[in-house]
Image (cartoon, rainbow, N blue to C red):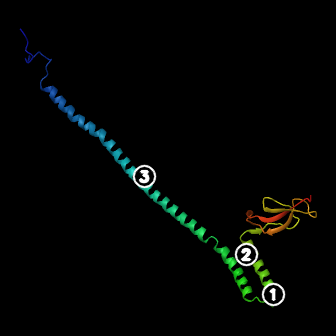
Amino acid sequence: MEKNKHDTHPGNTAQKGPAPAAAAAEEEVKEPAAVDERIKPLEEALAAKESEARENWDKYVRERADLENYRKRVQKEKEEILKYGNESLILEILPVLDSMERALAHSSEESQAAVIEGVRLTHNMLLSALKKFGVTEIEAAKGSPFDSACHHAMCQVENGELPPNTVVEEFQKGYTLNGRLLRPAMVSVAIAPK
């Protein structure tokens, strides 16, 4: 006799009735709860990271704006320094200009000695104003050694009185600014006669 697959016999344990369905339903109920328990901490961690990312982005945007404002401020200060940096020097030179204008206004054939004295005083005023700002003359007196670092040789002159490679004449004064060459002295240099 052939057994029907659908036969249920009390001794047949191969087929379980309603018990497996109840177990599966219980497992399904347990599984979503377990999944929810695992997802909840992940969602919280994700929310915390999103919050941190927003905060970091806000900080970045603020810092970027601060940096841009700093750059603009530094550029503006730089422009003002370049534009008005010489203000104190010019304020020192203006009285010299005033003195020269007064000397020219009062000059005549009869007052030549007074004009010369006024120009001499004005020259001294200008030198002292430049010294306040670190400008000093380069030594280029007749007979002093020629120094290519601060003298510019305009020509060579045969001279039996002065040793070779010494200054014969200064054509234009040279100056340094705080120890740095501002303008070399233009000089003629002695060479041995042929």
Which residue is pictured at 54% across the width and 66% down the height? 76
How far across and how far down the image is residue 9, in percent?
A: 8, 16
Q: Gap in Å between the C-alphas at discs 2 and 3?
A: 55 Å
Choose mark 2 or mark 3, whichever is in front: 2
Quadrant in the picture for the C terminus: bottom right
**Mark closer to the chain start, 1 or 2:** 1
**Compared with residue 194, is residue 33 higher up or lower down, i.e. above or below?**
above
How far across and how far down the image is residue 144, in percent?
A: 87, 64
Which residue is pictured at 7% across the width and 15% down the height? 4
Helix, strand or loop at disc 1? helix
Choose mark 1 or mark 3, whichever is in front: 1
Which residue is pictured at 72% across the width and 88% down the height? 105
Residue linked to disc 1? 112
Three-letter amino acid code at disc 1? Gln
Left or right: residue 43 compared with residue 140: left
> Outermost residue toward the front?
194
Residue linked to disc 3? 56
Residue linked to disc 2? 129
167 or 131: nearer the viewer = 167
Three-letter amino acid code at disc 2? Ala
